[in-house]
Amino acid sequence: MVTTQALAEQRVVLKNISWQTFTAMLNEMGEKRKVRLAYIDGILEIMTPLGEHENTNRFIDDLIRVLADELNLNLKKFGSLTLKHENMRRGAEPDSCYYISNESRVRNKRHIELTIDPPPDLVVEIDITSSSIDKLSIYAAVGVPEIWRYDGRSLQVFILSQPNSIYTPTQQSSTFPLLDLNMVPQLIEQSLIDGETQTLRSFRAWIQQQLNKASN
């Protein structure tokens, strides 16, 4: 067992864990818990989000809500939805996930079954302390089209390339092409100075300005 701890996350890594043990832990721990699990090839990571992690996750969630609102996009949020692929023995729980282009297909659902439902259109991962597990390969296994990963300094965005199911880094979000990705870290820092409400208000005004430019 390996344990790492910082101000943002505490991680415990267990090896030689069977898929059956992983799924049993998910069932026994239930949905109302703080820790998030990730599993691949017999390695289980248990991550406990701490203050900086949770604050950043919630603020990025606010940014996404503002974007969706101003762009008139229906948004369905599933938070740390458990995403797993039994045949490939992989599973993970993102910090946040969203249905946007596929929102209408899951609008009336409270529980997602990836055997019949599409994966989320967008997953957000906060990895301020490095994860011991390759989560991109997990999300590729379940077919998540876009990943946002914030490491405490920069935002990386990955798009799933077909048909090889490999994530490619990109400078533009497929979900929100209007967004300048460099703005996200800047807005996070700005929120620590001006406050979250003022920063979100400024971000909303920026979006409206971009939409006005595009319409003229």
Image (cartoon, rainbow, N blue to C red):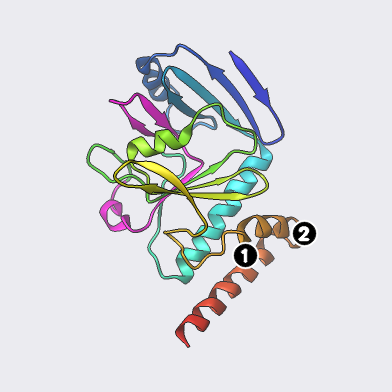
Residue at image position (41%, 25%) is: 26
Residue 21 shown in magenta: no
Q: Residue at x 41, y 46 (%)?
A: 78
Furthest-right residue in this view: 193
Task: Report crowding for label 1: few under 14, some 14 to 19, many 20 or more residues within 10 A (C-alpha).
Answer: many
Q: Amino acid at mark 1?
A: Leu
Q: Which residues are magenta?
A: 82-109
Q: Residue 24 is drawn in which quadrant? A: top left
Q: Is residue 163 left or right of residue 10?
A: left
The numbered disc on residue 193 is 2
Residue at horizontal 35 percent and vertical 24 percent from the top: 89
Q: Which residue is mark 1?
A: 200
Q: Secondary structure at mark 1?
A: helix
Position in image of residue 156 (x %, y %): 55, 49
Q: Nearer the viewer, residue 152 or 67?
A: 152
Viewer-closest of 184 and 77: 184
Query: Which three-letter amino acid code belongs to the residue tagged 2?
Result: Ile
Residues under numbered marks 2 and 1 in contact, where contact means CB atoms less than 8 Å apart: no
Q: Is residue 89 magenta?
A: yes
The quarter in which the N terminus is drawn is: top right
Give the left or right position of residue 55, taking residue 80 as reference.
right
* Vertical position of residue 104 compared to residue 165: above or below: below
Q: Would you place residue 79 above or below residue 195 in this image?
A: above
Tell me, for residue 132, which label it has, or none: none
Query: Residue visible at 39% across and 15% down?
Result: 21
Q: Earlier in the sequence, mark 2 or mark 1?
A: 2
The foreground one among 161 and 85 is 161
Residue 23: where, in percent of width, then height? 37, 21
Residue 51 is situated, as x and y percent measured from the top left of the image, at 68, 39
Question: Is 1 located above or below residue 38 in the figure?
Answer: above
Q: Secondary structure at mark 2?
A: helix
Marks 2 and 1, Cα distance to the nearest angstrom?
Answer: 12 Å
